[in-house]
Image (cartoon, rainbow, N blue to C red):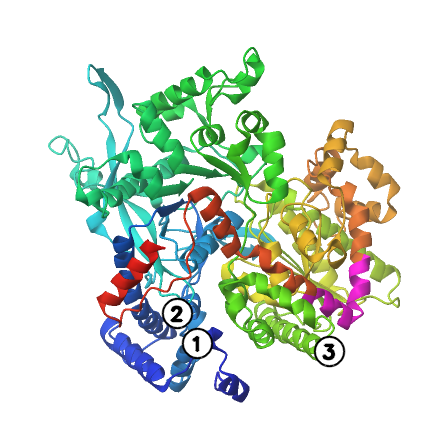
Amino acid sequence: MASPLTDLEKRKQISIRGIVGVENVAELKKGFNRHLHFTLVKDRNVATPRDYYFALAHTVRDHLVGRWIRTQQFYYETDPKRVYYLSLEFYMGRTLQNTMINLGLQNACDEAIYQLGLDMEDLEEMEEDAGLGNGGLGRLAACFLDSMATLGLAAYGYGIRYEYGIFNQKIKEGWQVEEADDWLRHGNPWEKARPEYMLPVHFYGRVEESKEGARWVDTQVVLAMPYDTPIPGYMNNTVNTMRLWSARAPNDFNLKDFNVGDYIQAVLDRNLAENISRVLYPNDNFFEGKELRLKQEYFVVAATLQDIIRRFKISKKGSTGPVSFDSFPEKETFTVLVEPVSPQAWAITKRTFAYTNHTVLPEALERWPVGLLETLLPRHLQIIYRINQGHLDVPLFPGDLERIRRMSLIEEDGGKRVNMAHLCIVGSHAVNGVAEIHSNIIKNDVFRDFSELEPDKFQNKTNGITPRRWLLLCNPGLAELIAEAIGEEYVKDLSQLQKLNELVNDDAFIRDVSKVKQDNKVKFSQYLEKEYKVNINLSSMFDVHVKRIHEYKRQLLNCLHIITMYNRIKKNPKALFVPRTVIIGGKAAPGYHMAKKIIKLITAVGHVVNKDPVVGSKLKVIYLENYRVSLAEKVIPATDLSEQISTAGTEASGTGNMKFMLNGALTIGTMDGANVEMAEEAGEENMFIFGMRVEDVAEMDVQGYDAMTYYNNIPELKQAVDQIQGGFFSPKQPELFKDVTNMLFNHDRFKVFADYEGYIKCQEKVSQLYQNPKEWTQMAIKNIAASGKFSSDRTITDYATEVWGVEPTDLKIPPPNEPRKALEETARVLTEK
């Protein structure tokens, strides 16, 4: 086993991975052995690799705890405005390496573990992903927490501690099979249960009217137990908190009728209450309208609001005299119902909340049936009616009854429903989309009536990614190369990557960037060969398409390109062909039949292509099983070409696109989501842009999309579709993909055939450039240099200053080993600022 520190690293000691001091290493080894002995009750004779992971995790956690407590003390002293980020998803992935990086312990831990005769990568691989999210939205929340801590904001993430996260995906005979993600079975070393802050959440019951007003009575109570996870900022001693709620039945649950009832059954029925936090709904961009989901939503909101109000009351201001909620919006802000007993209460509510919209797909927007709300939350339904009345009583658009009907919070068509997006807009002081194009669509189309009423309420906040996880952690070779070239400050100010433009023609730098990419490809191909028993052509282009499987993301378009490449090789095996390894990965919602068929089609095509001796090493197709955060960290640094090919106007932003760009991949994509801004930053000539624009799609919607015209006029498309339809890829079941081709011909909302020709031609340009490695790498450097805008630090700074009314700070909280006086002095400096 080689030492993790090469001579070069020892000489340069780049501090983005932390300094290796002899004392540091000795202390870490001591902590490791102590935890192995006292926490895990093992010695080296019987310890397993998992024990070693837990010993290291607890050792690293020890370095968090003092900073965590000190951060909370600092917030008490300075009493800043708090930011609360409420999300049903936090897709955190693994915690160990991110914590080591943000605390500057990575190199010291590497050295300590090496001296202990263990392998750091083996230990890191033992950690389960915290898969408490489906995809982009949940991962965005995780990136935001990292940035909020790095920017010194007094911020808290609030969500649900799902016992089972996003399912583990197995591919069996080409089909997706779901397995439960029992991520907590070995325990979670990063969380701390806080039973002393447990809170009641009420459901069901009825409303009793009296002279004093309405009372919600005879409710069922579920307890919300908080579990806290530390969120360290990068090298600033700030450690914020993510608080996740777990559902617990009260001790008297179903036992009130004990004398007449069945005690055993009553205890078993406790599960019914605790099911609320049992499992994450595996739906991305689809609203199912299930009661359990509504319970989850109310559970997290009710527990969180009580917790925030408790914290507000015990803050320095709140604890010095009678509590006035007039100052609540000045001290607390939310991105996501206080009972509006008065206009004042409603004004406070609006000043406190901000709403971020994440999708324009109509099937994804929540519309809860009134009957369900009436059963589950009867008092809240009354309040929603009152809010709606107040909203409609304002002379919105006098005489325009159709517009007023559209703007109501209650939809009457096809059964009464509460439009939750409308409720969010009416109850917030700011509404934003997550990329320029998306924000324009919600202003000018989806929520046009509302934006015409209150144009100043609508904003844009383009998404971003944390460079700590998505560069330093996943691509240390590139991170260190950049640090050598422009210094280390870029880690906290990604706009500094612009300096790399000066090195675009530097042959040594081009060579170094190219070598880092090749090293990453070698490493990832070793992983692929081990997991999938395939031989990877290392000189092939790694063409990667990883994201949730959905028709709008158009994995089918990619599949048609694979078939077209295969047919070209078969037609002329001796012709020059730029070799490709096409890697597709992602999960389909378990109930989404078409998405599961698409996975089966890709694997079936891969089976034919990979087994064909004529194709050989020119083309390989790999379906990445169980795509998740920790797998993204492996594949993204090794990627040459990033596929971002959704129909224009359907992807709100995308964040995978940004991760690939930062890691030196080139993008083939439509003008959709954040691709538009990536092209603005890097120059359209440095991306492979193809296909219809939003206006073209809108025009086609008016004129009608006729798939058959494209099929009949493009011979290569016809051939590919005929092969799918005729059973070429499923000889034992020729009809297997009939519903896929039927959809493509008759009801393809996302117009795959319309962009086929442009896509194929664009892919030819990609292959052409790949034959010139120097030019390819120069374009990659231009993309890296242009990716600064897409740091979540920039996104959060924009939210902080333009929505939340808080100021980021680069002030460093004094570390735990400095006296309390230092903390008070820093607090005084910040307060005076």
- Farthest top residue in view: 399
Q: Which image quadrant is residue 34 in?
A: bottom left
Q: Residue at x 63, y 46 (%)?
A: 673
In the displayed structure, would residue 226 be above or below residue 119? above
Q: What amino acid is found at the position of numbered circle 1 in the picture?
A: Gly
Would you say the magenta stretch is mainly helix, strand or loop?
helix
Mark earlier in primary sequence (2, 1): 1
Label 3, label 2: how far apart the Cα atoms are: 35 Å
Which residue is more in the foreground, 534 or 678? 678
Q: Residue furthest left?
A: 259
Mark 3 element type: helix
Region in magenta: 764-781
Residue 18: which disc? 1
Q: Which residue is denoted by mark 3 in the rendering?
A: 507
Question: Is residue 768 highlighted in magenta?
Answer: yes
Q: Secondary structure at mark 2?
A: loop
